[in-house]
Amino acid sequence: MNQATLHQLKVFEAAARHGSFTRAAEELFLTQPTVSMQIKQLTKSVGLPLFEQVGKRLYLTEAGRELFATCRQIFETIAQFEMKVADLKGLKQGQLRLAVITTAKYFVPRLLGPFCQLYPGIDISLQVTNHERILERMISNMDDLYIMSQVPEHLDVTCHPFLDNPLVVVAPANHPLAKEKNIPIERLSNEPFIMREPGSGTRRTVQKLLEEQGVSVKVKLELGSNEAIKQAIAGGLGISVLSRHTLLSDAPEFSILDVQHFPIKRTWYMVYPAGKQLSIVARTYYEYLLDAAKKFVGQTEPVSGSVDIPEYSASAVE
């Protein structure tokens, strides 16, 4: 490994992460032949194959997996050093890697904007995906912080509540139930229902409540995004349960139904693996988000006392 360069390790890390020389080249703004050459030189330096190709797919060898893990540690250490130096200079620089549940995309960008203005030297990578994919990313330690409304029960994590996330029953504005009050939850069984896709945290929460109340709904559609569900509701295809955050205040085409047992009380959490040492940038954003949530001009208020909430494990969360 005496002849291996940092550049070669960066090329290898990107190729290993994507499982593709082509995608690594696109990310690093290099040509594919350049990537292939760098990997070839690194392989020669290591003395063992780093990749093996089966059909059209690329897989890491045992040596490749060990090197990939080492690369992640090296780059994390370098990033921490660079951020520490910037902090000593009175600057905030580096990269913030955020992964958020799909519904969080309706408010996280509004909280990121002022943060970017405060710290223009910080580059932000924002991944938006569903609950199952978030867990996969967390297990692989791919991000600095995770924003989700359902804390994983079987992972050792640290979590911090910072904002309420009520789930409400949404219908077209002209729906017959729109003007009724205290609607029995059993009435939902008479309505065509639009449900999120399997793997969605919102779907699991809704199904749990319906099962507890002995209510069975007629699922007419399963859709993979809140936007698709909103369009379906607006088109008169049925009703659904969505986070209040997905509805803008000026959305006259929708009505929130006053159904018993709703809204379902949920909370937005900042989550990261227990024992993970947050970078200076991640800690800065964490502190910023706790303060910004108090001032968030949305439909909900922040969780009371969230600024000084101590860390606790997932087992403490109901």
Image: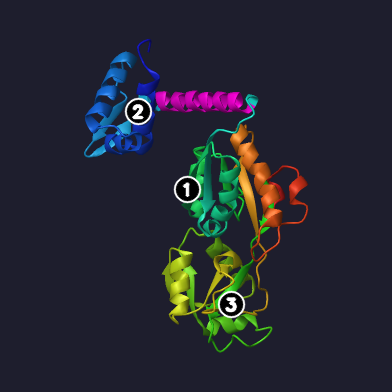
Q: Type of residue at label 1?
A: Gln
Q: CA distance from mark 1 to mark 3?
A: 35 Å
Q: Residues within 10 Å of mark 3 (few under 14, many from 20)?
A: some
Q: CA distance from mark 2 to mark 1?
A: 22 Å
* Of the image marks 3 and 2, the number of the one nearer the N terminus: 2
Q: Which residue is mark 2?
A: 11
What residue occupies the far bottom of the structure in this picture? 176
Quarter of the C terminus within the rendering: bottom right
Q: CA distance from mark 3 to mark 2?
A: 54 Å
296 lies above or below 143: below
Quarter of the N terminus within the rendering: top left
Q: As drawn, is 276 to the left or to the right of 15?
A: right
Q: Is residue 67 magenta?
A: yes
184 lies above or below 108: below
Q: Which residue is mark 3?
A: 215
Q: Which residue is mark 1?
A: 127
Q: Is residue 188 magenta?
A: no
Q: Position of residue 285 (x, y in %)?
A: 62, 42
The answer to which image quadrant residue 158 occupies is top right
* Mark 1 and mark 3 residues within 8 Å of each other at the beta carbon: no
- The range drawn in magenta is 66-87
Q: Type of residue at label 2?
A: Val
